[in-house]
Image (cartoon, rainbow, N blue to C red):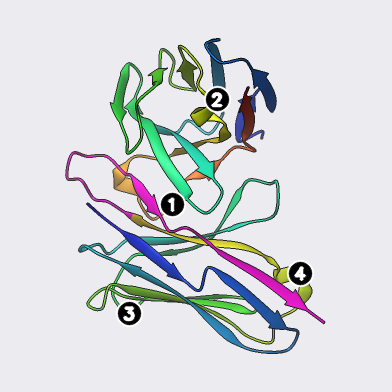
Amino acid sequence: ELKVEQNPLFLSMQEGKNYTIYCNYSTTSDRLYWYRQDPGKSLESLFVLLSNGAVKQEGRLMASLDTKARLSTLHITAAVHDLSATYFCAVDMDSGAGSYQLTFGKGTKLSVIP
Amino acid sequence: NAGVTQTPKFRVLKTGQSMTLLCAQDMNHEYMYWYRQDPGMGLRLIHYSVGEGTTAKGEVPDGYNVSRLKKQNFLLGLESAAPSQTSVYFCASSYSIRFYNQPQHFGDGTRLSIL
């Protein structure tokens, strides 16, 4: 059974500071996805990471994947209030049955304070 | 382009009642999914479908049934609602496994309360 663990689960940051969210998973996979969810809203795709060493950046967010360590990171640079949201990582279970199933972490609730 | 549309957005049921949640997508996606989101639990997969006429169980399928009679629609049914099924339900869709470089697209969710 694939387990996906995020930490921290809650993060309060000051504007302008840097921080990293970690996503560990328990079995081999080379497909990892990051999503953002605003309160009461749907999930918005941020990044798709498909190979070892993959790095993607969008604005103040940068995501990376280390498949050997079974670890992905989401780095926040110079945080601003608009980044306040819950961030989820999700890993493809790769069941081998031709399906495409995601197992989600519990999410990291990020609050950026002035 | 509407994307993934869920109906209804809110619903309150009494224990033992039944209901059907509807999900429709207009992106010609092969795969569709139903998740539930509970506080502190992330999203958990209930059922999914890899094509019209096919469905499969996810992580938490008990108490739910699904049908995919048309490619664009995926229905989630609760036969006899229980308070433990109070949750926010999300539908998602995606291209097939050959296009795993594309993310799953989510609807806005259905907030369901069982009294």
Image vertical order of residue B112 relative to residue A28, above or below: above
Q: Which residue position is annotated with label 1?
A: B102
Q: Residues within 10 Å of mark 4 (few under 14, many from 20)?
A: few
Q: Nearer the viewer, residue A100 or B65?
A: B65
Image check: B44 left or right of A60? left
Q: Which residues are magenta?
A: A92-114
- What residue did someone put label 3 on? A53
- Real-space Cα distance between discs 3 and 4? 28 Å
| Of labels 3 and 2, the one closer to you | 2
Taking the spot 30% from the left edge, 58% from the top edge, the residue there is A3
Q: Are marks 3 and 2 in contact (CB under 8 Å)?
A: no
**In this view, which residue lies farthest toward the left?**
A96
CA distance separating discs 3 and 1: 18 Å
Observer able to see residue B30: no
Question: x%, y% of residue B57?
Answer: 29, 30
Q: Which residue is mark 2?
A: B23
Task: Please say whether residue B45 is one of the residues in the magenta stretch.
Answer: no
Circle 2 sits in a helix, a strand or a loop, which is it? Answer: strand
Query: Which mark, residue A14?
Result: none
| Image quarter hosting the N terminus of chain B | top right
Q: Between marks 2 and 4, how big is the CA–CA gap?
A: 30 Å
Q: Amino acid at mark 3?
A: Gly
Specify the subunit that label 3 lies on.
A
Label 1 neighbourhood size at 10 Å, few (<14), some (14-19), many (20+)? some
Q: Is residue B112 visible?
A: yes
Residue B15 position in % (x across, y down): 56, 15
Residue drawn at 52 percent across, 54 percent down: B40
